[in-house]
Image (tube, helix red, strand yellow):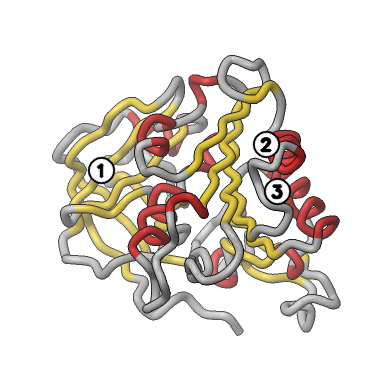
Amino acid sequence: MPAPPPDARSFLAEITAIEPCGADAVLLRARPERAMAPIRASRFFMLKLLDGTSPLIPRPYSIYRQRNGELEFLVKVMGQGSRALAAARKGQELRLIGPLGNGWPTLDGEGLPWVFVAGGVGSAPFPMAIEQALAGMDGRAAVDPGSISLLFGAANRELLYDLDVLRSTGVRVHAATDDGSEGWHGNVIELFEALVAKGELPEEVRLLACGPDPMLEACSELAERRGLECWLSLETVMGCGVGICNGCPVMTRPEGPLGAWPNAKCCVEGPVFRADAICL
């Protein structure tokens, strides 16, 4: 039976800043009560305020950045839990459980180029992924910035969170918006196909994707059609984050690496899965 990761803990943190980001999100920074080891991009934490404004059940958020002893989260304001976090004040206490789940695979510079595909707030696990790839991971060669392309899609330019920050990393950033207000007028899959057709992306790449389910389904289909390696970071509703409540099952492919059991738990076996391991 899959279990929570051995480094996961429940602990307190003090909120040090909350800043607007895009049209409907905030960046929340918090300083944990204890020092934390480096965290792999796309792992997550369960967050809850202690002043009674948060729902009883904590909410999962991908780690956005980790720097200067602080953890940073991109919070899209949608429901009660995210509204409470966005309205919190500097100095308030926050309960965190984590780091949870598994993150992106080792990002090395020795194989095919990487293409990161982000949809809206699904951009959250990519700033750290870029940072870790450019620095080198697990003793592997660092990735050259020119070997990473980020395809970032959203409904409009106001929902392309921290786009300028992502562009400043030196990787190739291509935007796509449904209304054409920034970059390609259309979705990120159409953008991918257009870039390949123009020779701006090679036909053989490795894909990492995080975003809404329809986008992930399209990425999985794209990878299968083109024979590409692909990993998906799922945005799934969770109750506990540690594998107890069974509230985040993901159907597995019988012929895939997790096919010995019909479902996988997103919180402990994910949130990152190989695309050929699950059904969306």
Q: Name the side, left or right, on which 172 lies relative to 255.
A: left
Q: Secondary structure at mark 2?
A: helix
Q: Nearer the viewer, mark 3 or mark 1?
A: 3
Q: Work out whether residue 236 can be spotted.
A: no
Q: Nearer the viewer, mark 2 or mark 1?
A: 2
**In the figure, 104 relative to 77: above or below?**
below
Disc number at residue 160? none
Picture residue at 51% right of the left edge, 79% below the top: 3
Q: Work out whether residue 49 can be spotted.
A: yes
Quote the CA–CA distance across marks 3 and 2. Answer: 11 Å
Q: Secondary structure at mark 1?
A: strand
Along the viewing direction, whichever of 10 and 118 lies nearer the viewer: 118
Answer with mark 3 or mark 2, whichever residue precedes in sequence: 2
Picture residue at 28% right of the left edge, 29% below the top: 19
Q: Where's the N terminus, which quadrant?
A: bottom right
Residue bearing the label numbered 1: 29
Answer with mark 2 or mark 1, whichever residue precedes in sequence: 1
Residue bearing the label numbered 3: 216
Q: Marks 3 and 2: CB-CB under 8 Å?
A: no
Specify few, some or many for label 3: CA neighbours under 10 Å numbering under 14, 14-19, or 20 or more: many
Q: Picture quarter containing residue 155?
A: top right
